[in-house]
Amino acid sequence: MSSTSLRPCGDFRTTYKADQSLFPTKWIFRWSVIGLLVLLCSPLLVDEYIISLLILVGIYGIAALGLNVLVGMTGQISLGHSAFFGFGAFSSAWLNTTTEIPVLITIPLAGLMTTAVGLIFGIPAARIKGLYLAIATLASQFILEDFFARANWFTGGSSGSVAETAMFFGIPLDTDIRFFYLVLFWTVVSCIAVANLKRSRDGRALVAVRDHYLSAEIMGINLTKYRILAFGISSFFAGLGGALFGHYLGYVSAEGFTIILSIQFLAMIIIGGLGSVPGAIMGAVFIVLLPEVMEALVSLVISSAPIFSGLESGKAYIKEMSIGAAIILFLIFEPDGLAHRCGQIRKSIKLYPFSY
């Protein structure tokens, strides 16, 4: 056999450019393109109920990406992510109502406004860690919740605020199918942005802060700067997702951005995989679909065995309980998340029959 017919049997990279590529392998790139094409065609393949679930996955996925930068990449903790999510929703509605700026522009502007608020809360939080940091971010949750209830000029107070329909060159995005493409655009942009952040100098500095902050400081990394930066980036994506959420619903109320939603955001990145861009989206898919699956299972049990008809009144409790149970089970049996498990499966298939 000639030497020219030989092919490498592994994944060999000989340059820094190849090592820092956005897609580790050609197959991942191809499957990503195929997945994007399927999503683009999904309104032709599924009904509007599935499209509504995909919209929620995209919106929550954007917010989870921001939290993953803070928790997964930098090693911080935040129990107030839903408050920044809500601030983005109120900001976009307020900007559009008071200044008549088009909704498509107020959505990213709301992300920038939320970034400013996140930086304010990030300054004191950047100097503490552990339990104290968790309490500080929990305080930001309650502070912003109280602000939402009292700032009638900004949020409408207890009455809430109307979020106008987005317009694209005169076309109202007033249906799930039309709004789906707006959410898909921002989801793809957010995923690419966070993936490129991980490959950048600042992204490697954030990871160094997470892995060993003393070593990072000795290497010249400004810990305070990068911790505050992580809060700012996290808040931007939370505000962006919140703005999309507000205009999707058409109405924004303070009751929708409680500590429970913050815990759900944490669940998304824990289940999906800390520090992983695909993991944030996988976690959002899991959290959005789990209550739907549990409701379908309960309905199936009731229809097949009428003796369990009493479960009908406990559907809401079962749906909420399933999320808590999922967090516990993943922390015990799959602490690295779904993204890591998918990577292990891909490697075992690639190395078959030597999958050990």
Image (cartoon, rainbow, N blue to C red):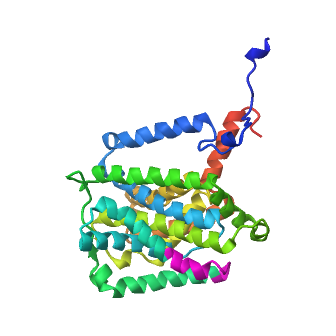
Q: Residue at x 63, y 69 (%)?
A: 226
Residue toward you, 8 or 118: 118
- Which residue of the protein is positioned furthest toward the left in this rendering? 170
Q: Position of residue 94 (x, y in %)?
A: 30, 74
Question: Is 176 or 8 nearer to us in this picture?
Answer: 8
Residue 173 placement: quadrant: bottom left
Looking at the rendering, the stretch of residues picked out in magenta corresponds to: 118-132
Above or below — where is 10 with respect to 172?
above
Quick one: quadrant of the N terminus?
Answer: top right
Q: Which quadrant would residue 252 be assigned to in this image?
A: bottom left
Does residue 12 lie above or below 285 as drawn? above
Number of numbered tags placed on the structure image: 0
Q: Is residue 306 visible?
A: yes
Which residue is painted at 33% across and 65% down in the image? 106
The residue at the point 72 percent across, 39 percent down is: 15
- Horizontal side of residue 293 vs 73, given as left or right: left
Q: Is residue 276 magenta?
A: no
The residue lying furthest to the front in this view is: 220
Q: Is residue 61 left or right of residue 210?
A: left
Residue 96 drawn at (x, y percent): 27, 68
Residue 68, x across and y down, in percent: 57, 62
On the image, the x and y values in percent for residue 199 come to 63, 51
| Residue 129 within the magenta-colored segment of the rendering | yes
Give 55 or 133, whichever is nearer the viewer.
Answer: 133
Name the quarter where the C terminus is drawn. top right
Mainly helix, strand or loop, the magenta region? helix
User: Quick check: can you spot residue 244?
Assistant: no
